[in-house]
């Protein structure tokens, strides 16, 4: 599934083989992102397409053998001649007279011929890790040149993983591909991504590889490839600009190739220290900027206007990034912002965020920056990843990489064009992650807010899932150790006792110990004053609740994940109403679930987005909710009885939130699997109106958080 839909797509046909192409964006010049080796398809460019297509027109296509294209088993369909024909056919079909051609690895052969033999179609060329016949004498024993000489090695001679890494290249042979294709894919993609903490790129690459077969790879590898003399001839005749990008740790193709290529063409070389063969995946920000700057050379010149304010004409400005997954972050961020304005009257706050947060902010009269419309939806992704009351939250975040990449690039463009004194990221995973990867891009004070620290595996996760989770934690710890001052403030929304008593992973620090060393604590931020019993009665009257009327409010927060729970509670309403005479049940679907998705029942009220929902929760005799932190803590602060049903496999709701609620002795947990109508109705009857006395929730969290931020202004 792609995060960005193409403006157009279709097929071209050459000698009976169909080639699938996509077009993104509208403004020129056009960038043609060539396919690479048949092992993967055009999704190898997923970290580039959203950003580049905002500034340029981008064309991608799948070469034969993978993706949406045909998978012929005759080698001639993979020949150099055929590959050039496919590229030209795609340019013609998309109405592209001339393009900036970008090539990775194997595709460098096609890009060089296009630039030399079809110069009228090429503005310039960007080549990444070229796998070409230059210079053969510099090839390492662990690259394709060595491996290509082993087509007849029998599988019995191939070592298993764990032996000498040098000998693993024996797997690069046709017979092994036919008999052990998946194992080869895991090996080869591991060589492509030698960078630490590259589990996600390897997982993606293997998944794409499994969309084709070893037989296809064999057919492709039987096709002839340009020799050194041909490559040198093309280089001598290329008259357009060329940029080569190469990682120093490339295990597939030696850096010497790009060095010689640039000598022969007069091209520019950018070397990325520590990078492997596919830097546009592991260092996407740097590659996006390099490709974008190169392509901008060919943009039609026109009048440019810009404004640069002197220091004395710059009011204090804050850019606030509030997580759009639900509405809880926005509620606390608004409370913090109000307190920040008390300390810095006249400060201007711009919000960079998404629906449903934008709706709440608009209701509050806040300024949502127009760049917010360029963000790709994190909420929609979370909804797509969910099942029936089920969301593997860590995997959902992990698979959101291209969305986070796009959204960081939107942020980067914004802070490059405009001046901000302070950037506040409330669980803005994109900004925190990519700023630590590219610390030189920081030009403002930066504060990070979160209400949990540490990804945790869920019971039932297999060994690899546990290792991957720990690896993400290790990467975070290492980055902060390397750049400890990138976060000018790290604010934990809560108290030290709210932190789970777990480690980041085996033989890793305890989460609480590490957090206490790296964060300041604001206490919990509710965004409202505690509601006393006396105030509650007047609030009930204001909201239209009759004296003595038992009121149950059902909500799943601001995300679109929760419709199954709402329907299950609605199904229990008749039996609950029988057990609780006069029961008034109000179901709030929120801004992302259509109220019609909950079947209508006599006596049951269903609302969509309900402003001031926390007031209804504070006035209710019972709430039935999901396991989100904000709603549960609002109910805890208001001392209201509630039943919470965490999403299955959601580590934050089950482990982090569950820990806080146990600390406050708050709420009654129920599991979705046990939630039949009779069981739920019985629980409602037992809990509604019950007197509770939870551990108090701090009331000054917003003020404390604002005090921590105010010093940065």
Image (tube, helix red, strand yellow):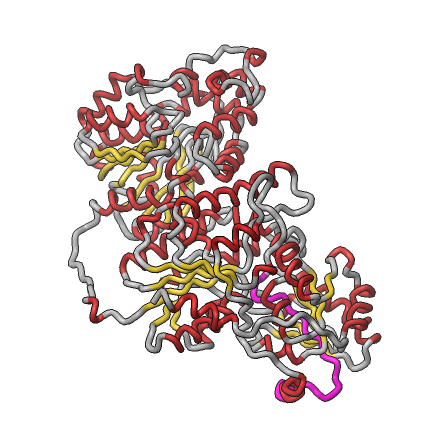
Residue 556 visible in the snapshot: yes
Secondary structure of the magenta portion, mostly? loop
Q: Identify the residue shown where x is 53% and y is 27%.
A: 213
Q: Identify the residue shown where x is 63% and y is 59%.
A: 657
Q: What residue range appears in magenta?
A: 542-560
Q: Identify the residue shown where x is 40% and y is 63%.
A: 352
Quarter of the image containing the C terminus? bottom left
Which corner quadrant of the image does residue 104 belong to? top left
**Residue nearer the viewer, 152 or 15:** 152
Residue 594 visible in the snapshot: no
Image location (x, y in percent) of residue 377: 47, 57
**Residue nearer the viewer, 505 or 46:** 505
Image location (x, y in percent) of residue 5: 44, 51
Image location (x, y in percent) of residue 707: 43, 70
Which corner quadrant of the image does residue 389 belong to? bottom right
Q: Is residue 555 magenta?
A: yes
Horizontally, residue 18 falls left or right of residue 100, namely: right
Horizontally, residue 184 falls left or right of residue 42, namely: right
Q: Is residue 547 magenta?
A: yes
Image location (x, y in percent) of residue 63: 41, 32
């Amino acid at each position: 599934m792609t995060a960005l839909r193409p403006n157009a797509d279709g097929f071209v046909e050459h000698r009976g083989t169909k080639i699938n192409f996509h077009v993104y964006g509208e403004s020129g010049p056009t960038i043609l992102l060539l396919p690479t080796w048949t092992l993967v398809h055009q999704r190898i460019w997923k970290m580039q397409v959203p950003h580049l297509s905002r500034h340029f027109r981008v064309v991608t296509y799948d070469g034969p053998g993978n993706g949406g294209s045909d998978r012929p088993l005759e080698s001639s369909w993979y020949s150099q001649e055929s590959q050039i024909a496919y590229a030209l056919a795609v340019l013609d079909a998309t109405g592209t007279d001339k393009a900036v051609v970008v090539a990775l690895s194997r595709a460098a052969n096609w890009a060089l011929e296009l630039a030399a033999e079809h110069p009228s179609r090429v503005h310039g060329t960007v080549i990444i890790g070229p796998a070409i016949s230059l210079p053969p004498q510099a090839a390492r024993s662990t690259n394709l040149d060595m491996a290509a000489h082993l087509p007849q090695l029998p599988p019995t001679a191939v070592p298993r993983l764990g032996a000498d890494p040098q000998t693993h290249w024996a797997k690069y042979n046709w017979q092994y591909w036919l008999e052990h294709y998946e194992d080869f894919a895991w090996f080869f993609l591991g060589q492509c991504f030698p960078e630490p903490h590259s589990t996600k790129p390897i997982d993606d690459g293997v998944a794409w590889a499994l969309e084709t077969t070893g037989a296809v790879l064999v057919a492709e590898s039987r096709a002839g490839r340009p020799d050194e003399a041909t490559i040198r001839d093309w280089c001598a005749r290329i008259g357009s600009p060329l940029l080569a990008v190469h990682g120093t740790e490339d295990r597939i193709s030696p850096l010497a190739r790009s060095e010689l290529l640039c000598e022969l063409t007069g091209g520019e070389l950018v070397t990325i220290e520590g990078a492997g063969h596919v830097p546009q995946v592991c260092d996407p920000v740097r590659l996006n900027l390099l490709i974008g700057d190169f392509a901008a050379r060919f943009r039609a010149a026109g009048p440019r206007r810009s404004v640069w304010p002197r220091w004395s004409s710059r009011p204090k400005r804050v850019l606030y990034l509030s997580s759009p997954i639900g509405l809880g972050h926005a509620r606390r961020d608004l409370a913090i912002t109000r307190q920040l304005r008390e300390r810095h009257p006249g400060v201007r706050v711009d919000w960079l965020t998404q629906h449903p947060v934008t709706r709440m902010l608009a209701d509050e009269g806040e300024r949502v920056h127009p760049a917010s419309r360029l963000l790709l939806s994190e909420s929609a992704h979370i909804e797509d990843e969910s099942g029936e009351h089920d969301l593997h939250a860590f995997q959902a975040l992990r698979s959101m990489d291209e969305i986070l990449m796009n959204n960081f690039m939107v942020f980067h463009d914004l802070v490059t064009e405009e001046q901000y004194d302070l950037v506040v990221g409330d669980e803005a995973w994109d900004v925190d992650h990519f700023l630590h990867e590219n610390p030189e891009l920081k030009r403002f004070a930066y504060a990070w807010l979160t209400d949990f620290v540490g990804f945790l595996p869920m019971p039932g996760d297999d060994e690899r899932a546990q290792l991957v989770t720990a690896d993400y934690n290790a990467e975070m710890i290492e980055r902060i150790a390397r750049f400890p001052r990138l976060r000018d403030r790290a604010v934990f929304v809560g108290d030290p006792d709210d932190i789970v008593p777990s480690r980041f992973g085996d033989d890793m620090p305890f989460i609480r110990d590490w957090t206490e060393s790296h964060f300041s604590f604001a206490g919990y931020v509710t965004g409202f004053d505690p509601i006393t019993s006396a105030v509650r009665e007047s609030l009930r009257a204001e909201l239209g609740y009759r004296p003595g009327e038992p009121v149950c409010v059902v909500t799943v927060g601001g995300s679109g994940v929760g419709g199954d729970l709402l329907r299950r509670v609605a199904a229990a309403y008749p039996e609950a109403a029988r057990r609780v005479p006069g029961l008034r049940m109000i179901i709030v679907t929120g801004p992302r679930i259509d109220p019609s998705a909950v079947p209508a029942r006599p006596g049951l009220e269903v609302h969509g987005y309900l402003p001031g929902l926390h007031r209804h929760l504070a006035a209710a005799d019972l709430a039935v909710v999901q396991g989100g932190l904000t709603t549960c803590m609002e109910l805890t602060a208001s001392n209201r009885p509630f039943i919470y049903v965490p999403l299955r496999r959601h580590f934050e709701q089950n482990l982090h939130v569950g820990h806080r609620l146990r600390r406050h002795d708050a709420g009654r947990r129920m599991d979705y699997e046990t939630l039949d109508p009779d069981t739920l109705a019985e629980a409602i009857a037992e809990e509604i109106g019950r007197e509770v006395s939870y551990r108090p929730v701090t009331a000054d969290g917003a003020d404390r958080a604002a005090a921590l931020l105010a010093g940065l202004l």
